[in-house]
Image (cartoon, grey):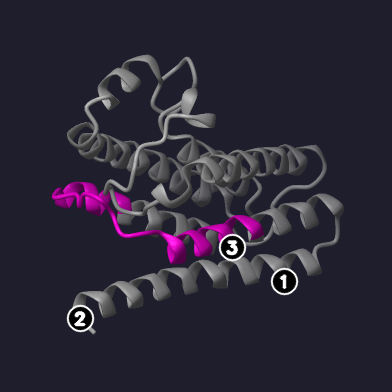
Amino acid sequence: MSSSFVKRVLSRALLASLFTLISVVGVIAAVRADSSAAVVHHALSAVLWGMFALLVIVRPIPVRRSGSKIGVAAALGAQVATLVLGAVAGDSAFSGTALWVADILLAGGLIFAIASLAFLGRCFGILPDVRGLVMRGPYRFVRHPLYLGELTALLGIALGADRWALAVPLWLVCVALQLVRTGYEERSLRAEFPEYGQYAERTKRLIPGVV
């Protein structure tokens, strides 16, 4: 058994365990919540973190490794920022309409992320490596729909967080890191797939019709 294989297994196990822990905390918070909006909020949060944990475990070996240290740092930084956001979110700060708005963002983003993942399949990865090219389904409208869904769901968590004044800036850090991450991912995709350039010209990066 090679040392690289052991390191890969340990890194996946550690990251997946952290996401799972936050998911369990969300389940406990949902059980203890005193309003239907809060129950929905924490339950959806738990599903999102559980999805992150599963994705970390099942991601495949890349076709092309990224040679950029900055790209790798941005990808890992986005994961760390996501974990910190989940850790500081705490209980719901609001109730009524405000919390339902956060729940809608969380649910919508989660559904969109799951739909994107269904089309992405085994091409999913954490680092800006190449595992394949997908241009169908949600990828017809934006080049990174999974990140769009994740960021939308995380915005719902941040807006509904007890410490939202800290959670919202952390969400902005996640957005910035994901934008850097997509830039390095696309460099690798352009190098591996000549048709990616034309696809990128006709398809926005993150928000349909905007950017």
C-alpha gap between disc 1 and disc 3:
14 Å
List the residue tagged with mark 1. Answer: 28
Question: Is the Cβ of the residue at disc 1 closer than 8 Å to that at disc 3?
Answer: no
Label 1 neighbour load within 10 Å: few <14, some 14-19, many 20+: some
Magenta-tinted stretch: 47-75
Question: Is the Cβ of the residue at disc 2 closer than 8 Å to that at disc 1?
Answer: no
Question: Is the Cβ of the residue at disc 2 closer than 8 Å to that at disc 3?
Answer: no
Residue 170: give x, y in percent of width and height: 44, 48
| Residue 50 image label | 3
Question: Which badge, 1 or 3, comes first in the chain's sequence?
Answer: 1
Describe residue 16's horizontal placement relative to residue 71 as left or right.
Answer: right
Q: Amino acid at mark 1?
A: Ile
List the residue tagged with mark 2. Answer: 2
C-alpha gap between disc 2 and disc 3:
29 Å
Q: Amino acid at mark 3?
A: Gly
Is residue 117 in the magenta section? no
| Nearer the observer, 41 or 129 | 129
- Compared with 90, 14 (above or below) is below
Label 2 neighbour load within 10 Å: few <14, some 14-19, many 20+: few
- Compared with 41, 134 (above or below) is above
Describe residue 58's horizontal placement relative to residue 177 as left or right.
Answer: right
Residue 68: give x, y in percent of width and height: 15, 48
C-alpha gap between disc 2 and disc 1:
39 Å
Instruction: Locate residue 100: give its quadrant.
Output: top right
Label 3 neighbour load within 10 Å: few <14, some 14-19, many 20+: many
| Nearer the observer, 48 or 198 | 198
